[in-house]
Amino acid sequence: MPSLIVRPELPQDRPRIEILLDQAFGHDRHSRGVYALRTPGQHVPSLSYVGVDTTAQVQGSLRFWPLNLNGSHEAPGAVLLGPIAIADAHQGQGDGGVLIERGLTDAAALGYGLCFLVTDSPAIYRRYAFTNARPRFELPVDLGAKKSFLLMELQRGALSAWPEGTALSAIGEPGQPAYS
Ligand SMILES: CC(C)(COP(=O)(O)OP(=O)(O)OC[C@H]1O[C@@H](n2cnc3c(N)ncnc32)[C@H](O)[C@@H]1OP(=O)(O)O)[C@@H](O)C(=O)NCCC(=O)NCCS
């Protein structure tokens, strides 16, 4: 049974989220290729969540990032899911699943057309309608063979607008809000 309460991320949560992400992915996580799709500070505010325990301590985090497709971010836009991290003591109780479902539901409600994902644990996302993003979509960096590059249609038909070889890239200037 989920042990955390999901609420929107607040600015004061950020130091604790950094700790959670370092614990989950290592202090060198910013060198991972997927960070090429995340402009620092530019996660989508309305799609950024934390899971808090009974003492209000942040024990989980999920963020989404705005993406350009072939240099465009016109509606229906695209988002990148992740990183997602749940503190060790709370893993395996369903909280990660709750965060993912909340994020995908809200992203669809906000009108985003596509959700992308880069992961080395595709099994986590098996229950959702993710499929291989290649060859229709290309990444700006080579992530290596171990990473799965997946996508999910959030709006029916959103995929059909994009030809094979469509390039993903990050949106935003560091430190400036992507969306006000
Ligand atoms: C991955 C993570 C966010 C999952 O959160 P969680 O709260 O432990 O997951 P849940 O209990 O909600 O489980 C959701 C589903 O994913 C599966 N799952 C969880 N972790 C998994 C893993 N590492 N590999 C494969 N499947 C996994 C669960 O079995 C469950 O599936 P089921 O309901 O069919 O049994 C969490 O374990 C974590 O923070 N791990 C370290 C960081 C990480 O790997 N993030 C994901 C990178 S894409």
Image: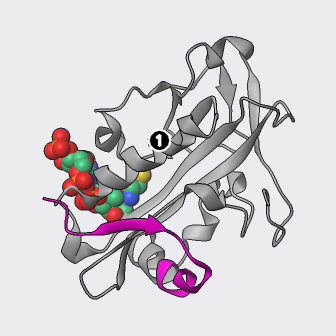
Q: Indicate the position of residue 66 as horizontal and vertical percent values.
A: 70, 48
Q: Residue at x 52, y 82 (%)?
A: 13
Say which of 122 and 43 sits in front: 43
Horizontal side of residue 73 vs 56, given as left or right: right
Q: Residue at x 45, y 46 (%)?
A: 119
Extent of the magenta region: 1-17
- The quarter of the picture where the N terminus appears is bottom left
Kind of residue at badge 1:
Leu
Residue 86, quarter of picture: bottom left
Say which of 38 and 139 sits in front: 38
- The quarter of the picture where the C terminus appears is bottom right
Say which of 112 and 122 sits in front: 112
Q: Which residue is mark 1?
A: 104
Q: Is residue 97 above or below residue 69?
A: below
Residue extending farthest left: 1
Q: Residue at x 51, y 44 (%)?
A: 106
Q: Residue at x 56, y 81 (%)?
A: 14
Q: Secondary structure at mark 1?
A: helix
Q: Indicate the position of residue 20 as horizontal and vertical percent values.
A: 42, 77
Horizontal side of residue 150 vs 76, given as left or right: left
Q: Coloured how?
A: one colour
Q: Indicate the position of residue 129 as horizontal and vertical percent values.
A: 39, 26
- Mark 1 is surrounded, within 10 Å at the Cα level, by few (under 14), some (14 to 19) or many (20 or more) other residues, namely many
Observer able to see residue 135:
yes
Q: Is residue 59 above or below residue 3?
A: below
Observer able to see residue 116:
no
Q: Is residue 156 above or below residue 90?
A: above
Q: Indicate the position of residue 74 as horizontal and vertical percent values.
A: 82, 33
